[in-house]
Image (spheres, rainbow, N blue to C red):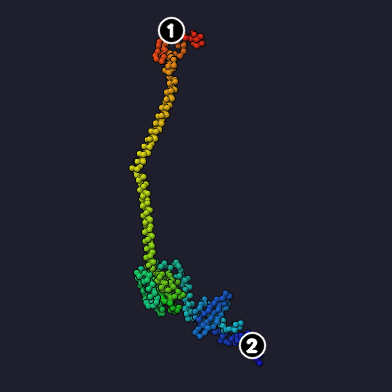
Amino acid sequence: MIQNRTYSVGQINTYIKNMFTQDFVLKRIYVKGEVSNCKYHTSGHIYFSLKDDTGSIACVMFAGMRKGLPFRMQNGQQVVVLGSVNVFERDGKYQLYANEIILDGAGLLYEKFEALKQELEEMGMFAPEYKQPIPKYIKRLGVVTAPTGAAVRDIINVAGRRNPYVQIILYPALVQGEGAADSIVRGIRMLDEYGVDTMIVGRGGGSIEDLWAFNEEKVARALFECETPVISAIGHETDVTIADFVADLRAPTPSAAAELAVEDVRLVQERLLQYRMQLGRRMADQVQQQRARLANSRTRLSYLSPQNQIREKRQMLAEKEDRLQELMAEQIRQKRHSLALYIEKLGGLSPLERLNQGYAYVADSEKRKITSVSQMPSGSLVRIFVQDGSVTARVEQSADRNQDDSEGIGTLW
């Protein structure tokens, strides 16, 4: 009897699956809940769970059914899943096989958020070329937020600590509920016309419903048209709104927005002290360099002065004069030596010197030089010059050198 009532695990799972398959309600059922444990598998399937306050159910959407899914599933989304409940025989677990998934409640707001975000992005309202730089040093800070709450206190405390000289102008706006978007728009435009240097628009954290005023198109357009640089500080770091994309700069929290908007005056003072010290050192270096240049210029000027030039020229002239005198003396010595040589030469060629050696100079009566016996015929008068005087003689007889020597000597008286 016991053996006839024993079934295998597979048989039990198959039996239960058939029961699920035959149940008309479970073939097409809508299940509402919060997404958790969401995982996109490499195969393309999506595995997740739906949960509420009373329990949870495992779900799967196969890759072939994902074409109709208009959004990316994330944990925490409220969704409605259309599908069928059946048993996975291998594990003996039942799960919801999803054919269609739609956002519900906050999920619908998320879908609306994505649609508006895509529309405004296509219009160019998120483009970086329209972003204005945040001024580094401001005098007036505009704040659009609720007059009570942690956000405004954090902004005032941080801004006052960083720079107590900055004036904070608060526009007390509604940031949640009916009329919040219009109130935020009025605050942005009023502070923009007032002429603040930087504006912070934001509030504390909350659900997507609480933050929805900052996802309105009218708020996005007011931020885009604002001429004052705007920092968005909406919710916590994980909260993202349309206003964050349109604003010139996004801060993760209101405190961070105050730090981005207000420069720390202590850092400025330290920087100014460093600049003063650097300026002093550079001025001292410049003064020292200019003094060195002045001394160099003074030296050059003294070297190039007319008086110094005259002294140098005088010294140069004196040196050249001494040199000239030396050259002249040398030339005189050389010329004297040459003259002595010429005198000595002339002395050897002088007639008087020849006369001193016993020679005589013979001239006719008209003092013309006689160089041949033919110029002295017999009976002519000649003048004979010797070393210490002259005599007059008459030629009695003359003969040329071809005759006998005894006959070549003329008789004079």
State the SS at label 2: loop
Name the residue that disc number 2 marks: 7
State the SS at label 1: loop
Could you tell me residue 103's position as x and y percent?
Answer: 50, 79
Could you tell me residue 367's position as x and y percent?
Answer: 40, 13
Could you tell me residue 309's position as x and y percent?
Answer: 35, 42
Label 1 and label 2: CA atoms lie apart by 201 Å
Q: Quadrant of the N terminus?
A: bottom right
**Relative to 204, is 378 above or below?**
above
Name the residue that disc number 1 marks: 379
- For the view shown, which residue lies furthest in the bottom direction? 1
Asked if one can make out residue 17 in the rendered structure from this viewpoint, the answer is yes
Decide if residue 43 is on the left or right side of residue 288: right
User: What residue type is disc 2 on?
Assistant: Tyr
Front residue of this view, candidates 76 and 290: 290
Residue shown at 48% from the left, 9% from the top: 408
User: What residue type is disc 1 on?
Assistant: Gly
Q: Dot 2 surroundings within 10 Å: few (below 14), some, or many (20 or more)?
A: few
* For marks 1 and 2 on the same chain, the one whose residue lies earlier in the sequence: 2
Asked if one can make out residue 194 in the rendered structure from this viewpoint, the answer is no
Front residue of this view, candidates 240 and 221: 240
Residue shown at 46% from the left, 13% from the top: 372
Could you tell me residue 221's position as x and y percent?
Answer: 42, 72
Decide if residue 14 is on the left or right side of residue 309: right
